[in-house]
Image (spheres, grey):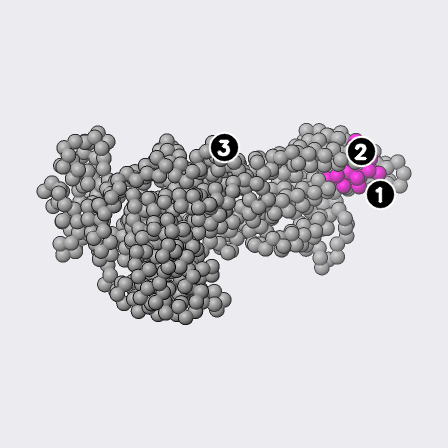
Amino acid sequence: MLPLSYGLEVIHFLEHHKTHGHHHRHYHYHQHQNPHKAHENIRVDGTFLDDLVPENQHIPLKLVFSGIYMSCNGKAILKDVCGKAEPGELLAIMGPSGSGKTSLLNALSGRAPIDKGAITLNGKMLNKDLKRHIALAQQQDLFMSNLTLGYTLKFYSKMRLPSTMTDEQKMDFKNRIASLFKLDDPLLLETNMGDVLQRGLSGGEIKRANIACEMFSLPSVLLVDEPTTGLDSHNALNVIQVLKDYAVNNHTTVVVTVHQPSSLMFQMFDKLLVMAEAKVAYFGSRTDVIDKFAELDMRIQPHYNPADFIVDQLYDSKKLEKLTVAAQEARCTANCSNVPTDYTEKDAVKSSYENQYPSIRCPFCEVQGMHAREKELADKPTAVTLQTIMNVSRNGTHNVVKSNSESDQDSGRSSLFSDSYHSSLAENIDKWAIPFWTQMRLLTERNFTEVISRCMTKVNWIHAILLSLVVGGLWCQIPRREENLSSIKGWMFFSSAIWLLTAVFETMTLFPSERAVINRERASGMYRLSAYYCAKMIGELPFVIIFPSVFHFISYSLFGPQNITTFVGHWGILLLSILVSQSVGLFIGAICYDARKGPVICSLYSLPTILFGGYFVSSIPYWLSWLRYTSTVNYAFNAMQIVEFVYGNPIICAAEKSIYDACRVGNATFIPPSNIIKTGEDPVFCLWIDILMLIFHLILFRVLSYLALKFYRSPTRTI
């Protein structure tokens, strides 16, 4: 079944076909320009903006918020805040620090719960489906620090742009967005994003990259928190100009927060929402703000920056009280204090689009200038999908495809304005831009690329090689005699214990920075958590294996005589125990948001696990004996012993005073494996039990990590 928006674009094509009599171009309503704007094909630095948004992917939405209250720990953050923004407009939220600007953006995006109030899009209460049309560029810029800018832009474009676009179209879109924000310099594209510990892009460059990445989601409502922070005056003005032109050309509702913009930047705003002390001091047109202040005996001096003048008045308590009272009184006529109960989608649409964009033939506007048959179809009560949809090919040919859907009983009104319209709109727009398997593939590639730059360093190689040489030197060619039995066991125990500590602490330390990026991306509905989690497991697997394998190959070769069975057996058990330890570190990193608590929790887990591993203490008190079943080192150590003593070269009995009966009484030359292991069961059976217990712990901590990421302090908005 084809989406409703496609059928409407067909109608617009037929209208254009009738007017111009040719088929060389497939028009859609995004390409129409606002007649009130004097300029056409607006460009920034030579880059056209009029056709950036692909067909069927953008829906103009009017944002209305009224009576917004928000509090945190008993402190009021927002108090009765109201306002609205139309498609094609740039609304600026101004005010001093702590006035509630960022909190309001979080509320409008649906990421922060409100105590009271209403937020609507085209008259429809904000819900989970409508949130997909909102993008929020946060003030905190979070990226994978080891990835280059070029790779980051490429990843976001492939992940967020719809699957209906080809890779070539996505790359073209990415290049044009990069050009708009002056991020297309070849040297800049090869620079790492960086963070506080690693040099990379400047603060202004990361800010521009942050906004650019949000634009890849093709939002109908774009919220940008402090887009000019960290930028010089020229680049700050350029960013606001890009946002302004993007709003006009693509009929996008853009809302930004700013502190004190320059006078040139101030002129770009269509509307102002001035806030102070969590309340509204002014809401209305930017052109009226000076007159409104003058009516309250606050007059600006000649040649004074209006933005500076406005903010200066907010620091005077008496003036602020006059402003807030005036703003409260103005709400009765501003039509934004509340949303009437009979305020339908049709009312919102017609007030927004027919008045401001009368020439735009969008899904909400009255269809004119059509063939009689097409007009009849448009006027006829229709269901969510049109009764007849025209399949228009690129060469202009078209076929009629009929739908079996029933008509909407709306007393002669088109169902374009019915209550079912917006619900069908959400259904026709995919929940995710790309399929699950494509998400997982892209995330695996990113994880693989990021881990290469993070883990495959000279320091890690030197660490693995030196550690293996030192360990191999200490246990070099130990004779397989009873006197050296403790040393042989010591090598196996040390191998499992040292890599447990390495895997747990390294994973726990590195994951929190990645988790912040993941939470941000998930909050914007970028991909499924399951796709990320599977990709992380796959992408990091080679690097979890490489360094322990280097250690094993070198140290075990120096350890002494061995055969292929023991070599491979020890290697497999070592890698399995490391995967378990990595899962534990991932779980601790997922539940621990305090960097100071993470190492403490790791120590509380690792030290008892090593102590109950079966090497340091041979006899454990009965009331503590149950703890050995929680020790993954215990299972790995026991499994290694079985492999070494059952399948490896035999251990020669001591010449004198052997502690084993088989050597003292039976005059045996070699110690029986059952005497060394002392399991009381079949050694092979015990080996499989140990392996299965390691697998059980692996699955357990993987599942717990996933659940922690999904439910424990998860992003406030997940789709």
Q: Is mark 3 on a helix, strand or loop?
A: helix
Residue 490 magenta? yes
Q: What element carries label 1?
A: loop
Q: How crowded is mark 3: few (under 14 residues within 10 Å), some or many (20 or more)?
A: few
What separation in Å lies between label 2 and label 3 (alpha carbons)? 55 Å
Q: Is mark 2 on a helix, strand or loop?
A: loop
Amino acid bearing label 2:
Ile
- Using the rendered view, name the quadrant where residue 153 is placed: top left
The front one of 626 and 98 is 98
Q: Which of marks 3 and 1 is nearer the N terminus?
A: 3
Q: Is residue 611 visible?
A: yes
The front one of 432 and 596 is 596
Residue under label 1, please give it.
659
Q: In this view, does 194 lie to the left or right of 63?
A: right
| Residues in magenta, as a range | 475-492
Tell whether label 3 touches label 2 (CB within 8 Å): no
Q: Position of residue 237 (x, y in %)?
A: 40, 45
Foreground label between 1 and 2:
2
Quarter of the image where the N terminus is located? top left
Residue under label 2, please give it.
478
Residue 495 magenta? no
Residue under label 3, please give it.
187
Q: Earlier in the sequence, mark 2 or mark 3?
A: 3
Q: Please name the predominant secondary structure of the magenta segment in the image.
A: helix
Q: Residue at x 13, y 49 (%)?
A: 380
Tell whether label 1 touches label 3 (CB within 8 Å): no
Q: Is residue 655 left or right of residue 535?
A: right
Q: Position of residue 579 (x, y in %)?
A: 60, 42
The front one of 396 and 685 is 396
Q: Earlier in the sequence, mark 1 or mark 2?
A: 2
Amino acid bearing label 1:
Ile
Foreground label between 3 and 1:
3
